[in-house]
Image (spheres, rainbow, N blue to C red):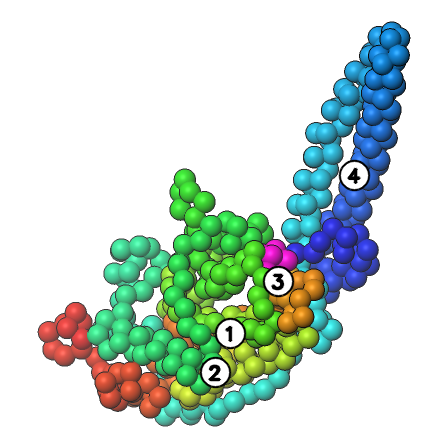
Amino acid sequence: MHDLKFVRENLGVLKETLARRLMDPSALERFEGLDARRRELLKESEEMRAARNRANDEMAALRKAGADAAPLLAGLKDLAARVKALEPEIARVEEEEQGILKSIPNLVHPDVPDGGEGSSRLEAEWGDRREFPFRPLNHWEIGAATGLMDLPRAAKIAGARFAVLFGNLSRLNRAVISLMLELHTARHGYRECWPPVVVNSRSLFGTGQLPKFEEDLFSLRGTDWYLIPTAEVPVTNLYRDETLNESDLPLSLCAYTPCFRAEAGAAGRDTRGLIRMHQFDKVELVKFAHPSKSFEELENLTSHAEAVLRAIGLPYRKVTLPAGDLGFSSSKTYDLEVWLPGAGAYREISSCSCFTDFQARRANIRFRGKGGGKAAFVHTLNGSGLAVGRTLAAVLENFQNEDGSVTVPEALRPFMGGTAIIEGPPAGGPDRG
């Protein structure tokens, strides 16, 4: 979030930001008018308060001299009433002004390309896309054929965009999570944490989900609690209203959590299988960095997410999102897109973003140097390391066999008790698989 002084002094920069993000600049134009009106009202209020104070002093002097102060009393009451009458108008203008401040997105990094969805810049590709001697199936077809993924029963229990996994497919899901956590903690130096999956509105405001994206959240009726859309929310807010030591930066945390999204605006987009679920698993990477090192840390964080794909052996590409497709809080974002042969397309599996001090201002997270002095806002970053369901889908599609079985990638076998092949369930039905 930008503070009032910054917005007032950088309206041109912010208008350029909105233009690059393909957003309507009218909010900033309203802000200009409101800010001018607010200053007029404050000036008028201050002048009347000063006049009231002078009248009070005159009355006190008259009374001390034994003179009649009654003639001043009516004027004093009128000044007090006029000051009081301005208060709700000042409050209304300030509330509307604050609403606009909360709606202005982060500045766009100069390296980010222009354009909207579809204008991403390709940065790198890794891995060879496998040539299949048969028609590769989609992951939900593989799941149904093996009897280890049950979407109809999930729909009976909860509704569309949920899944039930059985047997070795459930075990493979757990193995994917374990591999990610092992890589990020043992090799990449992240500290693992296990946060709540229920958060309050203050936490969601801190990371930028509220108020703009409320329709995509699941709230608990009659409370100030929400189910988390990503572990970014609780992990970033661990240090809300705190001041870190500069020597602790970069502070790197990772967390596995289930995540919950209403996906209100996703009708018709990847609604089959595990790609766009209401409930899904994710391993999240979060960093708190020194402002001078944050974009360097973005490269590191992104490479850590890539390491998971490489360890499993999943072909992917890395793209820089264009300004018009950036998240509200992000200044620069890399998307990692995994190849799904069943779909014949790349699908996002991780977004890695640097938020500069945008989230830290909203959540009031600062750091102080060794020599003391004034505390400054940290820079925050996060990225999926990775989305578990999408990783599972990619494993099923890329490692499927013509007989309907799935080869378990070698990196995952230690977490599967050495199991090398996932087959369909034995005779007797899918519930025994």
Query: For the residue marked with disc 3, what is the amino acid?
Result: Arg
State the SS at label 4.
Answer: helix
**Cβ–Cβ under 8 Å for marks 3 and 4:** no
**Cβ–Cβ under 8 Å for marks 1 and 2:** yes
Q: Residue at x 55, y 73 (%)?
A: 248
The earlier-in-sequence mark between 2 and 3 is 2
Q: Residues within 10 Å of mark 2 (few under 14, many from 20)?
A: some
Q: Is residue 314 visible?
A: no
- Quadrant of the drawing holding the C terminus: bottom left
**Which residue lies under the disc numbered 3?**
366
Q: Residue at x 56, y 81 (%)?
A: 300
The earlier-in-sequence mark between 4 and 1 is 4
Q: Residue at x 84, y 8 (%)?
A: 70
Which portion, as a residue range, is magenta? Answer: 360-365
Q: Which of the 4 quarters of the picture holds residue 83?
A: top right
**Cβ–Cβ under 8 Å for marks 4 and 1:** no
**Which residue lies under the disc numbered 2?**
188
> Residue 126 in magenta?
no
Q: Nearer the viewer, mark 2 or mark 4?
A: 2
Q: Residues within 10 Å of mark 3 (few under 14, many from 20)?
A: many
Measure the alpha-carbon separation of dots 3 and 4: 30 Å
**Which residue lies under the disc numbered 1?**
252
- Quadrant of the drawing holding the N terminus: bottom right
**Cβ–Cβ under 8 Å for marks 2 and 3:** no
State the SS at label 3.
Answer: strand
Measure the alpha-carbon separation of dots 1 and 3: 15 Å
Give the x, y percent position of residue 350: 50, 74
The earlier-in-sequence mark between 2 and 4 is 4
The earlier-in-sequence mark between 1 and 3 is 1
